[in-house]
Image (cartoon, rainbow, N blue to C red):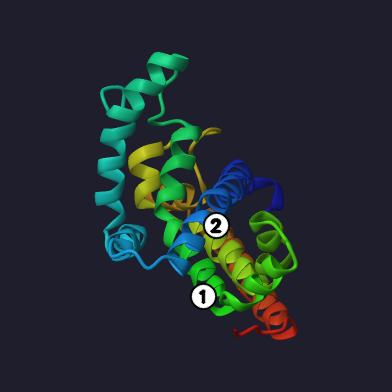
């Protein structure tokens, strides 16, 4: 198959979706993971179960309820449309929200484990030196949790790349807007265009393998901190 015949549009949309999703999840998932790593409240178990729910919930089930919530008659989608005039369902913005929820445990759980391994001793040492909580987090906790951050970024990015059920339910199959690689592969198979499906699948396979190889290499070179 000629290189020029490869459908690049789903590739660019997928990479953009994964990058935006990971950035959003790092911003939201870091305080959640920090709280889970240090709180002793009884309802921590409830929050952990909610965070881990996408791991066991069928993607079509999650996608269905997200479609209800993000639709024009849904709580979130109706409010969003009344403010902006645009629909969240079958849009890239809605796809980012859905992907963030779907990939949430793949970012929060590695960060939670990393923060738990750091412990409170380095933070208490920083506090005795009059460092503010923010300074202690940025200059002590975050560098020591670097391996957790790398793992969270890679798992969140890779998981978002390959999602299908949630994307199909919430984003649909709109070329140039919500048609990602997994949907394009499905379309090519349905049309018996196996060469195009093979090109996209092989590219995704090679990319995923190289990313994981890079993570394992970096993790071996980074120090492990245990409190």
| Residue drawn at the location 62% of the way across and 66% of the way down | 149
In the figure, residue 81 lies in which quadrant?
Answer: top left
Residue in the foreground of this view, choosing between 141 and 63: 141
Q: Is residue 195 above or below residue 95?
A: below
Q: Quadrant of the N terminus?
A: bottom right
Q: Earlier in the sequence, mark 2 or mark 1?
A: 2
Specify few, some or many for label 1: CA neighbours under 10 Å numbering under 14, 14-19, or 20 or more. some
Q: Quadrant of the C terminus?
A: bottom right
* One can see residue 172 in this view: no
In the rendering, at what x and y percent does residue 203 appear?
Answer: 61, 62
| Residue drawn at the location 57% of the way across and 52% of the way down | 22
Residue wearing tag 2: 30
Count of picture labels: 2
Q: Is residue 215 left or right of residue 64?
A: right
| Residue drawn at the location 57% of the way across and 50% of the way down | 18
Q: Is residue 212 above or below residue 130?
A: below
In the figure, residue 42 lies in which quadrant?
Answer: bottom left
Residue in the foreground of this view, choosing between 7 and 110: 110
In the rendering, at what x and y percent does residue 86 appear?
Answer: 44, 19
In the rendering, at what x and y percent does residue 14 appear?
Answer: 56, 47
Query: Which label lies toward us, 2 or 1?
Result: 1
Tag 2's secondary structure?
helix
Q: Is residue 136 above or below residue 89?
A: below
In the rendering, at what x and y percent does residue 105 appear?
Answer: 42, 62
Tag 1's secondary structure?
helix
Residue wearing tag 1: 116
* One can see residue 204 in this view: yes
Q: Is residue 100 above or below residue 194?
A: above
Give the spatial CA distance, label 2 vs label 1.
Answer: 13 Å
């Amino acid at each position: 198959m000629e290189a020029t015949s490869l459908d690049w549009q789903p590739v660019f949309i997928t990479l953009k979706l994964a990058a935006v999703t990971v950035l959003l999840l790092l911003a939201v998932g870091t305080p959640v993971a920090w709280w889970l790593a240090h709180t002793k409240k009884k309802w921590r178990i409830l929050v952990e179960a909610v965070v881990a729910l996408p791991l066991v919930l069928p993607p079509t089930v999650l996608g269905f309820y997200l479609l209800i919530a993000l639709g024009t008659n849904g709580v979130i989608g109706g409010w969003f449309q009344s403010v902006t005039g645009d629909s969240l369902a079958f849009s890239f913005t809605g796809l980012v929200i859905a992907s963030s929820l779907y990939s949430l445990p793949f970012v929060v759980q590695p960060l939670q484990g990393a923060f738990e391994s750091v412990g409170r001793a380095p933070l208490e040492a920083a506090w005795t030196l009059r460092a503010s909580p923010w300074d202690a987090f940025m200059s002590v906790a975050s560098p020591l949790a670097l391996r957790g951050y790398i793992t969270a970024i890679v798992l969140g990015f890779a998981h978002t790349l390959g999602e299908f059920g949630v994307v199909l339910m919430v984003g649909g199959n709109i070329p140039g807007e919500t048609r990602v690689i997994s949907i394009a592969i499905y379309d090519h198979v349905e049309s018996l265009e196996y060469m195009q499906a093979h090109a996209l699948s092989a590219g995704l396979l090679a990319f995923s393998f190289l990313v994981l190889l890079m993570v394992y290499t970096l993790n071996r070179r980074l120090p492990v901190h245990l409190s």
